[in-house]
Image (cartoon, helix red, strand yellow):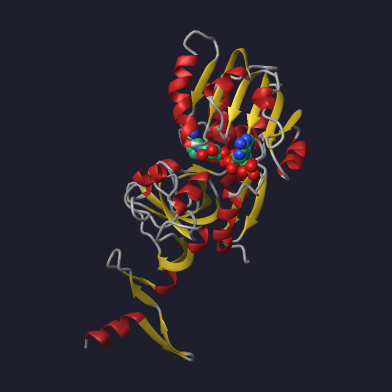
Amino acid sequence: MLCLIWKKVSYTWNASGWNQINRCNFLTGKIVPFQTSFMKAIICSRYGAPENLQLKEVDRPVPTENEVLVKVHSTAINDYDWSLVRGKPFLYRLMFGFFKPKRPIPGMELSGTIEVLGSEVKTLNIGDKVFGDLSDYGFGSFAEYVCVHENALTKKPATMSFEDAVALPHASLLALQGLRDIGRIKQGERVLINGAGGGVGTLALQLAKLHGCEVTGVDTGEKLKVMASLGFDHIIDYKVTDFTKTGESYDLVLDCKTTRSASAYMRALSPEGRYITVGGQLTSLISLLFIGKLLTLFSKKELKILALKPNQGLDTIIDLYLQGKIKPSIDGPYPLEETPRLIRYFGEGKHHGKVVISVGLQG
Ligand SMILES: NC(=O)c1ccc[n+]([C@@H]2O[C@H](COP(=O)([O-])OP(=O)(O)OC[C@H]3O[C@@H](n4cnc5c(N)ncnc54)[C@H](OP(=O)(O)O)[C@@H]3O)[C@@H](O)[C@H]2O)c1
């Protein structure tokens, strides 16, 4: 009897036979239309190689009071994804889940369109085109749909493409908060960007150029060509030259890949120079924190670590973008199916700029 009722609710008969029209969402217990209850997503069910990731059909999430359901247009790969998928460094598992990821869908940036509003959402509407960094509220953007707290989203200007929008929040704000908020960048300074060929470096160059700075970029391989075309004044291949040993000094160093000692960075700074790292090897960062404090005690030089405030300063970035003063450098877009390959491509540093995935794109 129950089977018959279920079939009546869930299936309809037409020329092609029985077709499922409704199904039960087991997360919510609600009967929902079949076609709108599933989504494709990249699932990380255990830590390991990116190749273990699977593209699966899973239940579409349902927003809580302060969340919206976003149909993802584009998403992007970040250092966090490379770490989350492999569960390395081990310390990150305190955040991601000790034995397996607490949230199985990675991805922390998105641009897309709002389809459903939570009951308490005040600032956004159905149909709004939005973008943002989700990391304050979780992950999940490597999917066709994701539920996001409204505070993590900003309305996308009509003239900004979904691909440009997704490439901006994380990288541009690491660059902006590093150069402007902590680094106090000044007109005409000598700036060095270490790890300059990636998402952060290519945007940091453009921000430093707005201040009339002379900018040196450090990276390697194919990225050096892209960097030359983007307008770096000087380019150093880190596999050939150690920028802390050239005898040159810089007023401001923005480092995306901290690998050296605090004393090496002190050597590369002008008398009132500031060194800001946005990320790198954990051991180097810890030593920078403690030894750096001691080294700068009797000096006007500064060694600082940036902790990103997600989405803070996005208004400035939007203004600069709309004035044509900054533009993200994009590697892609690629289809969602290619995410496992792209995470390895990113992790092995073969990319340039920001690796962007457009979810509707066919492989
Ligand atoms: N502070 C925060 O709150 C926060 C939050 C999130 C992320 N982050 C950090 O921010 C950084 C993101 O940068 P991104 O997105 O621009 O990364 P990215 O795209 O991977 O760029 C980093 C670049 O550095 C290069 N590189 C590697 N080793 C280097 C070395 N020894 N010297 C100079 N360059 C080197 C890489 O090239 P190859 O690998 O090809 O050599 C790559 O081109 C990451 O370190 C991430 O951990 C910080």
Could you say where residue 348 lies in the image, as x and y percent from the top left?
Answer: 60, 49
Q: Relative to the observer, which residue lies in front, 336 or 294?
A: 294
Residue at horizontal 35%, vertical 52%? Answer: 118
Please indicate whether residue 162 sits to the left or right of residue 291 in the image.
Answer: right
* Image-quarter location of ligand 1: top right
Whether 216 is drawn above or below 334: the answer is above
Residue 115: image quadrant is bottom left
Residue 193: image quadrant is top right
Could you say where residue 84 lies in the image, as x and y percent from the top left?
Answer: 44, 50
Please indicate whether residue 200 sits to the left or right of residue 19 in the image.
Answer: right
- Residue 308 shows in this picture: no
Picture quarter with the C terminus: bottom right
Please indicate whether residue 139 sits to the left or right of residue 360 in the image.
Answer: left
Q: Relative to the observer, which residue lies in front, 65 or 237?
A: 237
Please indicate whether residue 202 sits to the left or right of residue 114 in the image.
Answer: right
Residue at horizontal 31%, vertical 85%? Answer: 7
Whether 28 is drawn above or below 190: the answer is below
Picture quarter with the N terminus: bottom left
Could you say where residue 186 lies in the image, as x and y percent from the top left?
Answer: 63, 17
Total marks shown come to: 0
Whether 182 is drawn above or below 203: the answer is above
Q: Residue furthest top?
A: 298
- Residue 86 shows in this picture: yes
Whether 228 is drawn above or below 165: the answer is above
Residue 122: image quadrant is top left
Residue at horizontal 58%, vertical 30%? Answer: 255
Q: Relative to the observer, which residue lies in front, 158 or 289?
A: 289
Could you say where residue 33 lies in the image, as x and y percent from the top left?
Answer: 39, 72
